[in-house]
Image (cartoon, rainbow, N blue to C red):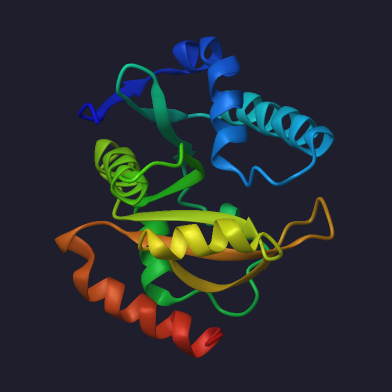
Amino acid sequence: MDAVRLRRVNRWLAQGLGGELGDLYVDSRETSAPEAYRSRSRQDFLNRLTGDIRRPGFAMVIAETDHLMGCAFGFPVGSDSFWWLGFDGALPQSMEQLTASGGVFAITSILVRPHPQDQDVARRLQERLLSDHQASLGATLVDQDDHPTLASLRSWGWLDVGEMWRPAGPTMFRALVFPLGERTTARREGLAHDAWTRWPG
């Protein structure tokens, strides 16, 4: 396999990649889903991407060989902790401190086309996105019924830290975090403890 290269993409280039990113989304999901569902799901993803592109600080990193292999994108979490609104229970102190200092970046999507190196590509994408923004912690929300995505994120090093509701709808989400590198080794242990005590299953 050709070497996988990572490249930062600004919001204008991301808009231009819409069709390719939509195809990547479909390829990265379960192929057993009915065609009509995949098509609707693809459009939902593109709508979410359009909304994220408009957010302040939006950033994307793509992985490519001779074609698009994966991408990760998101935006910085504000120091006002508004992003954590709806978190069930007390937010772990380490997460509060990192949020207040501007050290948290919300990764709203990580997509990787299935291939033998997909786990390595996913890790490289998320680490590059966070390091480019000098963030110590990645954060994301996943529908608690989306078991394939939850399983993938956990295999890529994400830690489950609890439940979260969004005021806009009835869906309950799992909140997951990804501590970056050696700078957060101690925090990783603390967050893992929080995750275990909050949700052992």
- Of residues 89 and 72, the one nearer the viewer is 72
Evaluate whether residue 84 shows in this view.
no
Instruction: Give percent across and percent down for residue 10.
Output: 41, 18
Query: Residue drawn 38% across and 20% down?
Result: 9
In the image, residue 190 above or below residue 136: below
Query: Residue drawn 47% across and 29% down?
Result: 58
In the image, taking residue 47 as reference, residue 40 lies left or right, namely right
In the image, residue 10 above or below residue 111: above
In the image, taking residue 194 as reference, residue 132 lies left or right, namely left
Q: Quadrant of residue 98?
A: bottom left
- Of residues 113 and 187, the one nearer the viewer is 113
Q: Quadrant of residue 85?
A: bottom right
Q: Quadrant of residue 67?
A: top left
Instruction: Give percent across and percent down for residue 178.
Output: 37, 60
Instruction: Give percent across and percent down for residue 123.
Output: 31, 49
- Of residues 133 and 155, the one nearer the viewer is 155
